[in-house]
Amino acid sequence: MRTEQRDATREQIVRAALFAISESGYDGVSTRTIAARAGVTQGLLTYHFKSKDVLWRAAADYLFATIDEALELAIAGLDNPNPKDVRRETVRQMVIFGSKHPETMRFMMDVGETESRGDWLVETHLRRIYQRFCADNTDLPKADIPHVFYILTGASMMIFSNSSKCRQLSGIDPLAPEEVQRHADILADLLVRD
Amino acid sequence: MRTEQRDATREQIVRAALFAISESGYDGVSTRTIAARAGVTQGLLTYHFKSKDVLWRAAADYLFATIDEALELAIAGLDNPNPKDVRRETVRQMVIFGSKHPETMRFMMDVGETESRGDWLVETHLRRIYQRFCADNTDLPKADIPHVFYILTGASMMIFSNSSKCRQLSGIDPLAPEEVQRHADILADLLVRD
DNA sequence: GTCTATAATTAGATAGAC
DNA sequence: GTCTATCTAATTATAGAC
């Protein structure tokens, strides 16, 4: 079908955009570079997506669809009634996701503080993630929720989105399976006690 | 003195570059914008710094001079022999620094994974910081050091470098003094126990 | 030392062939 | 649906006036 080919091409472009933008930043990558990585020409990007900004939004939608799917799976896989183990597993799953998708933090940090893209990202995707976090952590003091949210996010993902610097500094590859496990264990031990 | 004026102008430019790059990224800000923020013209940037890349390095030097100074002060202010309190105070100081200099994390995340600027940053500044951290944490298992380093870095600073998104999501301003204290307390309670 | 003017390059977006 | 060619604007770096 024509539609299938269309969708396949669009996904190729969106994926190329997501990874290229995560590596070099929105302003650091050209639409020509994205097109080359997707194996198409620059003109085709304008055909499928009206502008670079629209392509960026499609890349964000794609990234957060991945995040939503991972969160669903993580929750579905938990039928453990022990609340401590549940919280521990939640931390571990965030670390594992961060290692599988090191583009996440980079993509979000690339969105500046005052940009229109920032507002769009908050309202379109981040708020949903944050609400879910709030619902899952009703035991926390209400005033602590935003702090714990950002502590968890930063602590679980930063090492993976800076993996090459970490490798240069320490000699270990944080993306290696045993190091991912170690990161998950250390962070779970730190954040989930008694 | 001519030299004093020269140095003052150079610092004006470097500070403008640091903050502009931290806000919009290296590729997201033009040398004209930096010049305008420094109150000079674009041509003067090329006179004082040969290229945008050299100006970026000067901005990095300026940022890490600030970090070194803060670390010195934090250590000098600690004459508490209780090792637990020392570790707790270290975490608190990192949070406070992150709130005073939200540009730090943004500037470092902006440096991509494979760029030449990344290698330069690691060898010129990050390695020194990392070595200091290693020396201060000899009690930790050696294999845990890189993980704890990135956990601390991400957990202490991410909320401040995403302050406007945090404000939109949660309603609290993480840069407000009482929230900085709260972040410091929560993180210290989490990371420093028994 | 600082500014103005400009050269050379590259970007995103558009138009039209196939 | 995809590609080639081109327009317009913005970028960094340079040259030269003051």
Image (spheres, coloured by chain):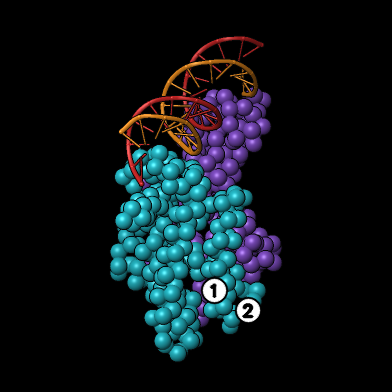
Chain colours: A purple, B cyan, C red, D orange
The one nearer the camera, B140 or B60, is: B60
- Measured as percent of width and height from the top left, residue A28 is found at 52, 41
Label 2 Cα neighbours within 10 Å, binned few <14 / some 14-19 / many ≥20: few
Numbered badge on residue B141: 2
Identity of the amino acid at label 1?
Answer: Arg
Q: In which quarter of the image is residue B156?
A: bottom left
Residue A116 in view of the camera: no
Circle 1 marks a residue in which chain? B
Q: Which amino acid does label 2 sit on?
A: Pro
Of B149 and A5, nearer the camera is B149
Q: Residue A42 carries which label?
A: none
In contact (CB < 8 Å): disc 1 and disc 2: no
Residue A186: horizontal and vertical position, in percent?
A: 59, 73
Residue at image location 67% in from the left, 65% down from the top: A172
User: Disc 1 marks which residue?
Assistant: B132
* Residue placed furthest toward the bottom: B81
Q: Which chain carries label 2?
A: B
Determine whether, in the image, residue B10 is placed left or right of residue A168. Answer: left
Q: Nearer the viewer, mark 1 or mark 2?
A: 1
Q: Name the residue at 38% across, 81% down.
A: B77
Q: Relative to A114, say whether B177 is above or below.
A: below
The alpha-carbon separation of the residues under discs 1 and 2 comes to: 16 Å
Q: Which quadrant does the N terminus of chain A fall into?
A: top right
Query: Is B123 located above or below residue B152 in the figure?
Result: above
Judging from the image, what secondary structure is the residue with disc 2 in?
loop
Q: Nearer the viewer, residue B150 or A56?
A: B150
- Asked if badge 1 and badge 2 are on a common chain, one would say yes
Against A136, is A124 above or below? above
Q: Could you tell me which residue is drawn at 53 percent across and 68 percent down?
A: B129
Q: In which quarter of the image is residue D2?
A: top right
Residue D4, position as x, y percentages in the image: 63, 18
Could you tell me if residue A44 is visible in this image? yes
